Image (spheres, helix red, strand yellow):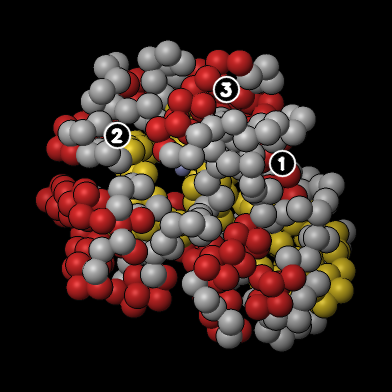
Amino acid sequence: MPPDADLLIRDVRPMGGDGADIRIEAGVIAEIGAGLSAPDGMAVLDGGGALALPGLVNAHAHLDKTRWGLPWSAHAAGPDRDARIKADRDIRRGLIASTEARARALCEHSARLGTSHIRTHVDVEPEFGLAAVEAILALRDKLKGTVDLDLVAFPQFGLVTNPGTAALMEAAVRAGAESVGGIDPAGIDGDRDGQLDAIFAIAERQGAGIDIHLHETGEEGALSLDAICERTRVLGLGGRVAVSHAFCLGTVDDARAGHLIEAMAEAGVGAVTYAPGNMPVPPLKRLRGAGVTMAVGTDGVRDAWTPYGNGDMLERAMMLAYRLGYRADGDLELALDAVIAGGAELLGLERHGLAVGCPADMVLVQAETIAEAVVSRPPERTVLKGGVSVSGASGP
Ligand SMILES: [Zn+2]
């Protein structure tokens, strides 16, 4: 198929609805309806009655850390955040495969499972400089037409306590990263205002977004989230700021959580979760009810932090639903909507979905309903990126 694909897909069920054909012109959805005609010479794909979904969005990854494609390695880190950071640094020093090769293997695997967009936090710090950012930026160019990458310059090893990091983060944004990251401003740096002031100053100067890892629990995290919302509101950065993990929302009392959610809604601060197994998941329905965007990511996949993960965002939707105790079909659909629509909104994708005018990023699976697709995660998937087949389907 040519790079800007023209294609007629016959007999699919967009979002599990009635059967339809989808005509794609120059990589964009041009028409959806029953019995569409194919112009002369247009390629035709038989959808076989499959369920059609928009491209899946992974809103939180760490592509530079993954060991995807390398032989299995036993988890070596201690049980807490600081031990995992130390192990991350030690392992990073000894990794043989290049960042680009490891990240590429995971990206291509994820794309074959239907992921069309990945936001990846990429480590920036004096010992490693911008090497990881440069590798992922180079990869981004090579993966155009397979999966789109969105970069966050991430101070994994601290910002205020790791001199030189802030300047490198700003350099990463100038080099092409979309957003500035952060991590536990009180818990890691012991200087909430210092870290947040540095992050917001870079974002303001460079016109960048912000996505801050907030593992802090209880009132420590709540105060950090308050401070993030306040800065976002004052600087008018609503819609461009996100908090990843936000464990504090589930570790303060109900009234405090309500105030935090109100502040997020008022300021325009979004939330991202990876549906962790042993920490609270942000309350999806409550956040959406308040008008707060919530997206979903894999977080690390087979790296110093975790042996888990396979890059499959259908599986991540299931994990989110499972962690939230969802059972009804509508609730399972809500979990996948957080992956697709929530992710698209958080990443600022202007057009994403199965609608005329949207890029033809989609995944076809054999399932009766969205709920069934979330639970069964069919391994066989037909994936299109801009109307072009992402080849070599393989199971998760
Ligand atoms: Zn993370």
- Three-letter code, disc 2: Ile
Q: Amino acid at mark 3?
A: Ile
Q: Nearer the viewer, residue 39 or 386?
A: 386
Q: Which mark is residue 284?
A: none
Q: Residue furthest left?
A: 234
Seen in the picture, residue 296 relative to 148 is either above or below; the reply is below
Q: Secondary structure at mark 3?
A: helix
| Residue in view at x 56 percent, y 50 percent | 298
Residue 329, x across and y down, in percent: 61, 84
**Viewer-nearest of labels 3 and 1?**
3
Q: Which residue is mark 3?
A: 91
At 68% from the left and 39% from the top, the residue drawn is: 106
The residue carrying mark 2 is 188
Task: Look at the numbered discs 3 and 1 and tell me whether their residues touch, using CB distance below 8 Å.
Answer: no
Crowding near the residue tagged with mark 3, few <14, some 14–19, many ≥20 C-alpha atoms within 10 Å: some
For the residues labelled 3 and 2, say whether their Cβ atoms are less than 8 Å apart: no
Q: Label 3 to label 1, Cα distance in Å?
A: 23 Å
* Circle nearer the viewer, 2 or 1: 2
Dot 1 falls on a residue whose secondary structure is helix
Residue 108: assigned label: 1
For label 1, the crowd category at 10 Å Cα-Cα, with few meaning under 14, some 14 to 19 and many 20 or more, is some
Residue 278 point in image, percent of width and height = 48, 57
Residue at (56%, 55%) from the top-left corner? 57
Q: Looking at numbered disc 1 in the image, what kind of residue is underneath it? A: Glu
Mark 2 or mark 3, which is nearer the start of the sequence? 3
Q: Is residue 195 left or right of residue 12?
A: left
In percent of the image, x 43 and y 63: which residue is there?
281
Mark 3 or mark 1, which has the lower sequence index?
3
Q: Earlier in the sequence, mark 2 or mark 1?
A: 1
Say left or right for 88 vs 42: left
Image coordinates of residue 374 in percent, x first then y, are 66, 70
